[in-house]
Amino acid sequence: MQAAQLVKYDKQFQLQVREVAVPKPGPADVLVKVKAAAVNPVDTLIGTGSVKLIQNYAMPVTMGNEFSGVVSAVGDQVTDFQPGDAVYARMPLDKIGAFAEYLVIEQQSLAKMPKNLDFDHAAAVPLTGLTAYQGLHEELGAHAGQSIMIPGGSGSFGQMAIPIAKELGLKVSVSGNARAKDNVMAMGADRYFDYRQENYWEHLEPVDYIIDTVGPKELSHELSVLKPGGRLLSLVMGPNRRFATDRNLSWFKTFLFSFAGKKIDRQAQEVGASYRFIFVRSDGAQLRAVTTLVERENISPAIDPTVFHLADINQAIDLVNHGHSQGKVLIKFDD
């Protein structure tokens, strides 16, 4: 089979499409024939070596973090899946490999696809869906009656986070562009700020939580609307000491992440808040909860219309990094 592999970390990395053996499933594993794999910013973070302190890989490594496909074979201990099932998942961080014609994944990381989605749209769900689920349930511990602001939340992440937040009973505010307002309000958002027309930090009452999708340039505005005791969760600003200690990382990594996140931690503490960073993990049980939500709300994530195949993997990554994609960028696999 063919697979797109990283041979070394490099700021200008290029994946190589190679012929490799079809992987063999272990007793608790599932062999999947991949139908579609989504390209994400995390692929670039891995390729450049930016996250090797969180997860380092032996080279060469087959890349790719989320996919949809059809079960081809199962191990002897697999009880939840059988050949022919349509499935999807976020690959475990230590065993990525979605940019391949076949992959092996442990059954506990896998879920059956939402019935309302085709393979292309399903491949665009796991990372954002699990990020939203883990962020709201685990990192923030959000519950009914509280409030949240998601700056830049009008895209694919907000599409998953808003319904989950509303299901938890939160009051949800979002900022984004004008054309997204109607869709975001239809998802259940309580308030929407067109960033070209008004500054949310000048009008929004203090909130319990912030989920940052923008980065450091937005930090001061985010902290200005956060209640004392509130939590700011970032998808992009990087790990800190709490990230390291929550994951029982080595003392050396804890020291490095403490140093890297020191400035953000200090700024958050100055307003009586705390800062957290999320690096989403695979979880089949949580993905099944996301599936239920996707089916109930009939969520269909936006996907970019450009058709890429495995031979085009580097162009697809370039579009994610430097282009203006109109949704998740996909690698499609022919039958």
Image (spheres, rainbow, N blue to C red):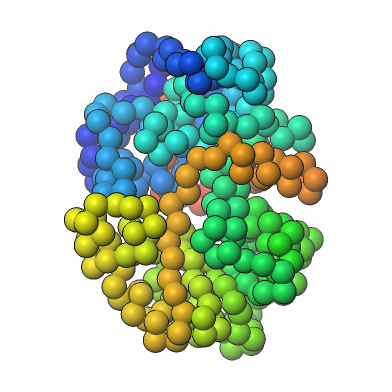
Q: Nearer the viewer, residue 203 or 316?
A: 203
**Location of the N terminus (image quadrant):** top left
Q: Position of residue 258 (x, y in %)?
A: 27, 66
Answer above or below: position of 318 versus 178.
above
Say which residue appears at 55% left-offset and 71% top-offset.
210
Q: Position of residue 51 (x, y in %)?
A: 31, 49
In the picture, measured across the screen, residue 46 lies left or right of residue 287, that is left
Q: Position of residue 20 (x, y in %)?
A: 35, 14
Say which residue appears at 33% left-offset and 18% top-offset.
18
In the picture, measured across the screen, residue 333 lies left or right of residue 314, that is right
> Residue 268 appears in which quarter of the rendering?
bottom left
In the picture, measured across the screen, residue 199 lies left or right of residue 265, that is right
* Residue 227 appears in the picture as rendered: yes
Answer above or below: position of 51 versus 308.
below
Q: Position of residue 271 (x, y in %)?
A: 45, 86
**Location of the C terminus (image quadrant):** top right
Count the numbered circles shown: 0
* Residue 66 appears in the picture as rendered: no
> Residue 191 appears in which quarter of the rendering?
bottom right
Q: Nearer the viewer, residue 106 or 157?
A: 106
> Residue 291 appears in which quarter of the rendering?
top right
Extreme residue in the left direction: 252
